[in-house]
Image (cartoon, rainbow, N blue to C red):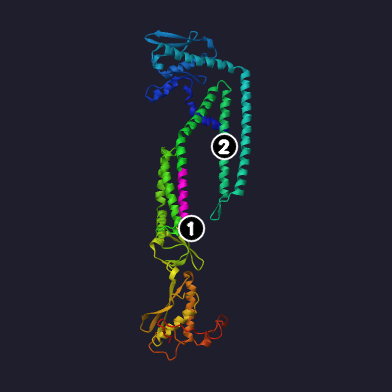
Amino acid sequence: MILLLALAALWPVQAAWGDTSSPASASSSSSSLAGEPEGAPVVVWNRTVVTLYAPYHGMTADERAHAASERIESALDTLKADDLSISWIEAGGEKGAALRAGNLVLFGILPGDIGTDDRASIEQAAGRGAAVLRDIIRERELARQPRLLLVGVMYSVLATMILIVLCWGLIRLDRFVQHKLIAVTQARLRLDVAGFDLRPMMWTLVRRSVSLVRLALTLFFGYLWLSFVLKRFPYSRPWGSRLGEYLMEIGLQLMTALVNQLPNLLTLVVIFLVTRAVTRLIAAWFRAVEEGAVQVGWLEAPTARVTSRLVSMLVWLFALIVAYPYIPGAGTDAFKGVSVFLGLMLSLGSAGIVNQVMSGLVVLYSRAVRVGDFVRVGDHEGMVVEMGALSMKLVTRKREEITVPNSVLSSTSMRNYTRQSRDTGLLITTSVTIGYDTPWRQVVAMLEQAAARTEGLQADPPPFVLQTALSDFYIEYQLNVAIQRPSSYVMILSELNRNIVDIFNEFSVQIMSPHFEEQPKEKVWVPHDQWYAAPASRDRRPTAPPVVKVVPMPDGKPPV
C-alpha cells in the first residue's frame, strides 16, 4: 500500500525526467512557452543523453531523437566508454559535432540544437552528451555484477525491515498517545454546554488527529524508503534521485514560504495581543460600572455587561479587518471564494437573527425591562429571568417558562408592573356594583375596611375608592390599593375579594347587582350563621364574628 501511494506521488514528476540531466531541457521548456519548437530528448536507459531541437534533411527533431535512441540502444551492449569520441563535420552546407563510437555515428549536435553556431559551444554540448552516455555504459557494467545486485537487494531488504519496524512503532505510539490523551481529558477537562457533555466529541477529535499524524509519518517514511531502494540499483537510480530532489524541493519551498510569511505572522501576533489587551481593559471598565464602582450618566449597571460584549465584538471585528491582508493566502482565489461564500451564507441566513438582535438592543437600551421585573407581554405575564440576544424568558406563577422573541417585544406593547412600583407601589383595583338603595358612604367604608383586613397592602398611599360609573341599575365602585410585590398581586387580589364578600355579608348589604323590573321583597344576602355552609369548614375561620375595624374616611368623617 505504501509503495502504491509513493508511486502515485511519483508519477507527476516523471514527465520531467526526460530533461533531468541535460541543461538543454530548461531551454526546451522555456522555448515551448515562447512558442518555439519543443525539444526531443534522446533517452537511453532511463536517462536523457541530450535534447535535440533542429530538423535535419527532412527529419524532425523527434525523428532524429528517436533514431539516435534506437542506434544507441542497439549498440549499447557492445559499447565501451573509451570508444566514444567527438568529431567536427562540415558537409553540404551543414556543420555540427558528431558523437561516434568507432565508425558508428550515434547522434549529432547542430547549431539549431543549442541556439548558436559557435563551434566550441556545439562541441561542449556534444561532450556533455558523451559524458552522460559514458556514465550509462559504466552503470550497465556495474549492474551486471552479481555482487552489486546482491548488495542492493540486501540494503533494500534491510530498509524494508526498518520501515516495517517504524510502522509498527507508529501504530503502538498512536494507541499509547490516544489512551493517554483520553485519560488526561477525562480526568482534567470539563466541557459541559447546557448540560451536554462534549468530552466524547473531544475524544473522537483527538483520536482522528493522532491517526492523521501517524498516517502522515507513515507516508513520509514510505517515501524515503522508496527513494532509498530505487537508488540501490543502476537502472532505477534516476528515479530515486528524482524522488529525493523532489522531496528536497518541497521542503525548501515550505521553508522559503515560512520565512517569507514571518513578517506577516509577527504582524498578526502583534494585532492579536493589542486587541486582547484593549478588550480586557474595556471589560474591566464595564465590570466596574456594573458593580457600581464607576458611575456614568449614559450607562446603567444592568446594561453594562451587554454593552461590554458588544464593544468587545466590534473591537475584534475591526482587528480582523485590519489583520485580513496579513493572513497567509488571503490574496489567493481560493481564499476569496471561501470569503464570498461565507459572506453570502451570512447575508442569506442571518436576516432573522440580525432582526432579533437589533430588537433586543432596542428593548435593552430603551430601559423598558430588566431581569427581575414582573411584566405582561400579550397573553403572558411573569417574572423576567433572562434577557438574551435573541429572546426574553419569563416564569409565570404557574411555573411555566415562556420564551418571547425580541422581535415580538419591539412590536408589542408590554406592561411592566415593577418599574414604577419600586417607590410608590403598584396599584391594583377591584370593582363591585351596588344598587342605588344602598348608601354609597356605607359601601365606601366597607370597601376600605376590607382593604384594612388584607395583608400585603401598603399604608402609603392608603386605599381609596372611586365611583367609576352611575349605571341604570347600580353604581360601580372601584377599590384601589397599593402593593409592594407585583408578582404576588393575584394572591393579594384574591384575598381582597374574599374580604369584600365577608364585609358585605357582615353588614347585610346585597352585593349582587340588580337587574330587575320590580324590587325584590327580601334582600339577597348571606346571614352570618350561613357563612360556613357545606363544603366550607369552620376551621379555616374563627367561629366568632371578626372584629370590625372602623377606618376613617378620607374626609375625616366616620363611615355610615
Mark found first going from the N terminus, 1 or 2: 2
Q: Can the viewer see residue 478? A: no
Mark 2 closeness class: few <14, some 14–19, many ≥20 residues within 10 Å:
some
Whole-percent x, y for residue 526 in the image: 49, 86
Q: Is mark 2 on a helix, strand or loop?
A: helix
Frontmost of labels 1 and 2 is 1
Does 54 sit above or below residue 520? above
Specify few, some or many for label 1: CA neighbours under 10 Å numbering under 14, 14-19, or 20 or more.
Answer: few
- Assign the C terminus to one quadrant of the image: bottom left
Q: Which residue is drawn at 40% across and 82% down?
A: 555
Task: State the residue position of label 1.
Answer: 291
Q: Give the residues in magenta.
A: 272-288
Q: In this view, does 378 lie above or below 112?
A: below
Quadrant in the picture for residue 267: top left
What secondary structure is the magenta-colored segment mainly?
A: helix
**Residue type at numbered disc 2:** Leu
Location of mark 2 (residue): 215
Instruction: Decide whether residue 245 is among the magenta residues.
Output: no
Q: Residue at x 55, y 21 (%)?
A: 235
Q: Which of 189 and 521 is in front in this view?
A: 189
From the viewer's side, name the closer residue of 438 and 447: 447
